[in-house]
Image (cartoon, grey):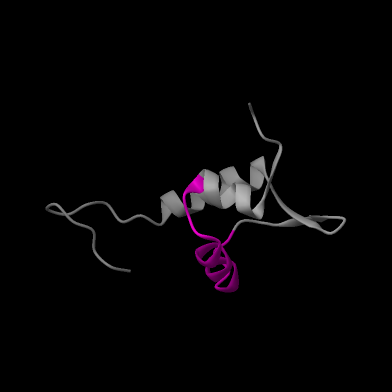
Amino acid sequence: MLTAAYTIPEFCAAHRISKAHFYNLCARGHGPAVMSAGKRRLVSAEAAAAWRQRMEDRIIPARRGGHEPR
């Protein structure tokens, strides 16, 4: 089933990250866009896709079996 929007716990579970890591990413300005719906905070499917793309773009190509640190 396709999800139109994730709650924070759903987003974290779907992307296999902890909620602490999610909030650390957000604090550093690297988290997905979050919208408010009443008292709930949600990540739209589009924001999740854009975030995944940004994270993939940050990956450095492997050099001789490993990644260089950024």
- Could you tell me which residue is drawn at 48 percent across and 55 percent down? 17
The one nearer the camera, 63 or 1, is: 1
The quadrant in which the N terminus is found is top right
The quadrant in which the C terminus is found is bottom left
Instruction: Determine which quarter of the picture holds residue 2.
Output: top right
> Seen in the image, is 8 located left or right of residue 22?
right
The one nearer the camera, 48 or 70, is: 48
- Could you tell me which residue is drawn at 42 percent across and 49 percent down? 56
Q: Residue furthest left?
A: 64
The answer to whether residue 25 is magenta is yes
Q: Residue furthest right?
A: 38
Give the number of marks.
0
Residue 62 percent across, percent down from the top left: 22, 52
The answer to whether residue 18 is magenta is yes
Residue 53 percent across, percent down from the top left: 50, 47
Q: Which residues are magenta?
A: 15-31
Q: Residue furthest bottom?
A: 27
The one nearer the camera, 4 or 14, is: 14
- Could you tell me which residue is drawn at 58 percent across and 47 percent down? 50
Residue 59 percent across, percent down from the top left: 35, 55
- Could you tell me which residue is drawn at 59 percent across and 73 percent down? 27
